[in-house]
Image: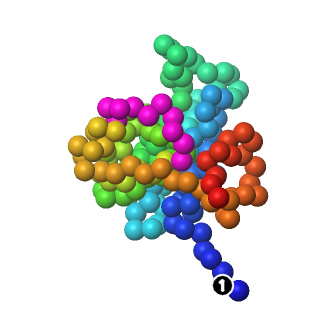
Amino acid sequence: MQYERIPWDQYFMGQSLLLSLRSTCTRLAVGATIVRDKRIIAGGYNGSVSGDVHCIDEGCYLVDGHCVRTIHAEMNAILQCAKFGVGTDEAEIYVTHFPCLQCTKMILQSGIKKIHYLKDYRNDDYAINLIEQAGASVHQVKLSKQYFNNLQFGDDSEFISE
């Protein structure tokens, strides 16, 4: 019997799903993995600034309908690269949800050229336009039951295809 290895895009998205399990946001758990040359260089999840209280403990700190306590997963991953001196030019990012406009701008400004996401989430037309203008690409990953069927995703299993 021939053993089939998990495809790269599903492997890296699986890493992002795993990271999302560390999220301290009660509104949406997001994970992000930055990859260069098929090697993981950083990961992040959405949560509070190190040392601050977490939304899961104190509730969200909402201003104009947005939690200002939370740092997005994409930002945390990029900041991890900055903190440890790891370049992001020509890298790829795998995110569990389509990046918001601010994260899209940060991703592009950091030199990341490929954005892979699992779920649509308030996909912003201007963000899509910026991705095209920057010569970057965006790709929705569909997970295969062959690799992810035994995982428990609750009602969110619609992103797993046959």
Q: Could you say where residue 7 lies in the image, as x and y percent from the top left? A: 54, 68
**Image quadrant containing the C terminus:** bottom right
Q: Residues within 10 Å of mark 1 (few under 14, many from 20)?
A: few
| Residue 124: x %, y % from top left | 39, 31
Please tell me whether residue 144 is drawn above or below residue 19 in the rendered image.
below
22 lies left or right of 136: right
Towards the viewer: 28 or 47: 28
Which residue is under mark 1?
Answer: 2
State the residue in front, 118 or 47. 118
* Magenta highlight on residue 140: no
| Residue 131 against residue 87 in the figure, above or below | above
Where does the magenta region start and end? Answer: 118-127
Instruction: Write the residue at 34% across / 35% down.
Output: 127
Q: Which residue, as the protein is rendered here, is positioned at the far top? A: 64
Residue 79: image quadrant is top left
Residue drawn at point x = 43 percent, y = 51 percent: 139
- Residue 78 % position (x, y): 42, 47
Q: Where 48 sits versus 147, above or below? A: above
